[in-house]
Amino acid sequence: MAAFFSSLGSRLAALPMAVLRLPVTLARGLLATARLAAGRGRPEPHAVARARIILCMMVFACTYLAIGGRLAMFASAPEGTLARRAVSSDAVASARPDVLDRNGLVLATDVKSSSLFGEPRRLIDVDEAVEALTAVLPDLNVDELRQRLSTDRGFVWLKREITPQQQREIHNLGLPGIGFMTENRRVYPGGALGAHVLGSTNIDNQGIAGVEKWIDTRGLADLHLAGFASDRQQEPVELAMDMRVQHVLRDELFAAKEKFKAIAAAGTVVDVRTGEIVAMVSLPDFDANDPARSLDPKNLNRLTTGVFEMGSTFKALTFAMALDSGRFNINSTLDARGALQFGKFRIHDYHAENRVLTLPEVFLFSSNIGTAKMALSLGVEYHKAFLAKAGQLDRLRTELPESAMPLVPKRWGELNTATISFGHGLAVAPLQAVMAVNAMVNGGYLIPPTFLKRTPEEARALATRIIKPETSAKMRYLLRLNAEKGSAKKVNVSGMYAGGKTGTAEKVINGRYSKTKLLTTFTGIFPMDNPQYLVLVMLDEPQAAEGTYGFATSGWNAAPTTGKIISRIGPMLGIMPRTDVPPAESLLTNYTLAQAP
């Protein structure tokens, strides 16, 4: 009973003062009327008594009206609304916009779930409440629950996201001071599919990683804090990702990881014309519905958060730099008869030809010596300036907040230029290297990658030309020639007219390059006469397998994996296999004819 009157007093205190003063004002009016009726300063006794009786009646009437009004408000308010007002420092899971793939498939959405709260001030018997609640929710910590319910706070969370069955059982207990609040809970229908891109939310439905965190940085977090994002209909976020392609990429990477016993695998598919990221996978991954697993260091997104020496795939940038400078052309030759000596360091070729090579042969045989000589002939500063222009020396910024800074040499001399020219000595995020290779084949435009849908017009507005169109045509020729005659033969499948570049880098273990632990990469582009998509595949520490003849280099694992991916996703992306595949030389001939007046 004392609790009832205490509660009643708090409710009356919440009423406006004007309402509470109304009976007093009316009583004063009645007394004044009584004085006037008596015609003298002091009213008649019966008039005073009548005024007091009316005053008491009005006080009781206003009190009951206030109680009735509050009860009506309690009855009509949605479940959880009043409890939500009691929340102070306790956050409430608010609504978020849906996340869709480029075809409208739902990747992340909110569902309603009930959460259990307590109002310690209204509890009659704390021990009874603890015993009853733990019987229904045995995972609750008894001591912690008793401590929360023994405070004098008006609101405390007891358990977030309980099941409907648990809600019914607790409701049937009839415990005063125990209630339910309907909240929004984030779910990801695809589970692990796209988890690294989508990211995750915390218990309060606030983004903590990936695209989910990016959504909050656009102002949703401020709406949450202000209380304006609750159950709010919001425009969905449309990603550039295609879940069909995402599935194929993950499927093939998983198979390659198992076959070659790699410790990790990663890959991405990017539209070279717009910079849109159509698919991205990093294995091991995690179920987005279980965000705690994303904290495992093994589950990091290797394409944006990790930095790696990209090996010979980086040679594409060196060749583009050399051809664009005007100092070299397709008919240039380079002497690869002997190793390059820098003090105690020697640079040699993996499969040495020990002869003078033409520029295309340097590319086909992936000659470290020939590539280093091209970069050294242009000079250290020229090399650094080109890589800076290609976006390789600064942190890559995308919608994903997780990004890594490249590892750039503090002192950059000729030895650094020589090794970086063929992909050693400079570690970048793989997506960063993909951005630069896109520019090598799309006509020379550096376009920032994006996880959101982007039109060609929007891409052109963001693009920066870094090489000439004719240089891009020559790079397309070299990449296709490599698939016909060089180390990228295993990507030349299914009539997709693909090209690409292999890359095998020795990993740095305890400050030294390991001869047995490799990072293999392959960059594939298709179709080469009208480049539309780039596919990057990475395998971390792959092993020799059946059919690789003891080799664990990129041409035997990453390249065939890329070929399988291209053959499967091509038709999904509107690129069908063809039988009239022209030779690589036609890429140069057709470009020359197109430029003729």
Image (cartoon, rainbow, N blue to C red):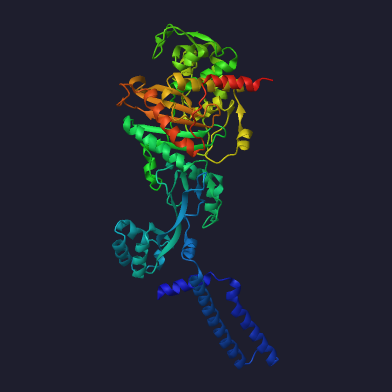
Residue 112 or 394: which is nearer the viewer?
Answer: 112
Residue 196 location, quadrant: top left
Please indicate whether residue 297 sits to the left or right of residue 404 in the image. left
Please indicate whether residue 499 sits to the left or right of residue 123 in the image. right
Residue 582 screen position, x and y as percent:
52, 24
Is residue 402 shown to the viewer in this render?
no
Residue plotted at (54% across, 78% down): 65
Location of residue 438 with respect to 122 vertically, above or below: above
Please indicate whether residue 162 sits to the left or right of residue 459 in the image. left
Residue 315 screen position, x and y as percent:
48, 19
Residue 386 location, quadrant: top right
Residue 135 screen position, x and y as percent:
29, 63
Is residue 32 shown to the viewer in this render?
yes
Residue 166 location, quadrant: bottom left
Location of residue 363 with respect to 337 vertically, above or below: below
Residue plotted at (46% across, 21% down): 484
Circle count: 0
Residue 41 screen position, x and y as percent:
68, 88
Location of residue 343 with respect to 271 vertically, above or below: above
Location of residue 316 with respect to 174 vertically, above or below: above
